[in-house]
Image: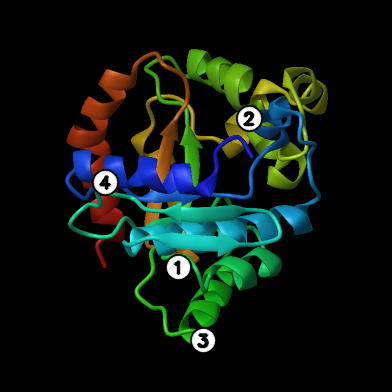
Amino acid sequence: MRYHPAVVAQKAATIGILSDGRFTLGLGSGENLNEHVVGAGWPPVNVRHEMLVEALQIISDLFDGGYVDFVGSHYRVDSAKVWDLPASRVPIGVAVSGKQSIEAFAPLADHLVAVEPEASLVEQWDAAAAAVGRGNSRKIGQLPISWGRDRDAAVEKAHAQFRWFGGGWKVNAELPGTAGFAGATQFVRPEDVAESIPCGPDVEGIVEAVRPYVDAGFTDVALVQIGDEGQQEFLEVAESDLLPALREAFSS
């Protein structure tokens, strides 16, 4: 609701050009935290899925080039056109969590995005995409990590900034503000976070956290480094140690 799909398409095309084709547009059905501020209310998940289907149709049509007119239940587009498109079409990845979202979005999107290493998501996505002649999609898993030389400090950082992750998106999508997130996670302990998020300087720990996604059939894993401290050091370690370890573990 904060950004009309036609505006999202224009922004994505621009980034596609500036990144020389290295950009993937990631979309989802939204979170109350980000959307309620415009005063339009927060719709139930079924309506949010309907809205995202329409948004995907609009964005995809604009990526095709030319003028687009669209009249739906939630969005309208009148003679819209993205004037500067990248040489290669911007791929679209969509966040899914179960059968309903997969059946709605797999026919319209290029890639899957998920936060749980569930093989059923991959299998259902591939089947739904194949049914409409779409193939060769990436299955992208999202995994938070808290890298740092001091493990205790890394655990504390993860607990302070990412303890909400354990609640799952069915809960997180409905919370309207920081007070809600604080209340929903008030009983989450640092050790609980450390059990679900790799913390500290342990490269092998990150490799083992990636393994369930590989075993479930995911083709990609996006590592989300928590916090803004130590990012450069993490990137250096990723280049020198982590990426070689991942390649060695999963080269087959």
Q: Which residue is mark 2?
A: 193
Which color mode does the image show? rainbow
Tell which residue pokes out farthest to the front in this image: 79
Can you see residue 192? no
Is residue 85 or residue 126 the one in the foreground? 85
Q: Secondary structure at mark 4?
A: helix
Q: Residues within 10 Å of mark 2 (few under 14, many from 20)?
A: many
Q: Quadrant of the C terminus?
A: bottom left
Tell me the kind of residue under disc 1.
Gly
Earlier in the chain: of badge 4 and badge 1, it is 4
Cα distance in 3D space between marks 3 and 2: 39 Å
Q: Which residue is mark 1?
A: 217
What numbered label is drawn on residue 16?
A: 4
Q: Secondary structure at mark 2?
A: helix
Earlier in the chain: of badge 2 and badge 4, it is 4
Q: Nearer the viewer, mark 1 or mark 3?
A: 3
Is residue 125 or residue 211 the one in the foreground? 125
Earlier in the chain: of badge 3 and badge 4, it is 4
Q: Secondary structure at mark 1?
A: loop
**Horizontal and vertical percent position of residue 48:** 71, 52
Tell me the kind of residue under disc 2.
Val
Q: Residues within 10 Å of mark 3 (few under 14, many from 20)?
A: few
Q: Residues within 10 Å of mark 1 (few under 14, many from 20)?
A: some
Is residue 242 or residue 220 the one in the foreground? 220
Write the residue at 53% across / 54% down: 77
What numbered label is drawn on residue 131?
A: 3
Write the residue at 39% across / 58% down: 62
